[in-house]
Image (cartoon, rainbow, N blue to C red):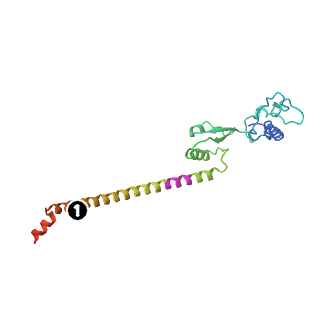
Amino acid sequence: MVDKKILELRNARKAKKPDFVRQEAWRRPKLTIKWRQPKGGQSKLRKKYRGKRKQPSLGYCSPSAVKGLNREGLRERVIYTLSELDAFDVKTEIIIIGKIGNRKKVDILKKCLENKFRVGNVKDVQKYIKDVEEKLAKKKKDTKAREDKKEKAIEKALKSKEKDEKKENLDEKLEDAKEETKKGDKSDKIKILEKGE
């Protein structure tokens, strides 16, 4: 563990550190506020004139013993898979979950809860797991409902198609019967009726 006095010293230095703003950023909207070194030949900021903004320099840097550590003095370790948790050191490191999908993230958080690991970028782990599982369950339910609706629509379309085909077949038979009677030939139905008399 790192000495707390050095951490306090770093925090005190960081509190005094000014915001380093790019030259002319306040005047020109197209320029970003992010720091860029001034390179102009007549630049007063580059020449460090009195009354101009401060530039980044070595005097503002943190003590080397605490560089890259968070406020509690722990090194942040980005994790993407469950296997990376095996080589995790609880005393000197804190977990930062990388940009991964919700399912993987929930698996990692569950393992962190079991092993009592600290997670830096999730405030309430149990609440987060509960919310994500609810979202996933809702999504699954919605997709199932959508698929059922699609299947019903397909079945309905097939039934209507069969009905249309039956109607077409009946119409064709009736037309055939009419054509036969027009030519002078008696249709099968008429012949059967005559025999019955």
Query: Which residue: 13% across, 69% down?
Result: 193
**Mark 1 burial class by Cα count in 10 Å: few <14, some 14-19, many 20+:** few
Residue stretch in magenta: 133-142
Residue 97 lies, in percent from the top left, at 63, 42
Is residue 100 magenta-colored?
Answer: no
Q: Residue furthest front?
A: 183
Residue under numbered circle 1: 174
Query: Which residue: 38% across, 59% down?
Result: 156
From the viewer's perspective, tell me whether residue 160 is left or right of residue 65: left
Q: Quadrant of the N terminus?
A: top right
Residue 174 lies, in percent from the top left, at 23, 62
From the viewer's perspective, tell me whether residue 195 is left or right of residue 111: left
Residue 26, image quadrant: top right
Magenta stretch, overall SS: helix
* Amino acid identity at mark 1: Leu
- Residue 32's place in the image compared with 176, above or below, is above
Residue 9, image quadrant: top right
Q: Observer-nearest residue: 36 or 178?
A: 178
Q: Observer-nearest residue: 193 or 32?
A: 193
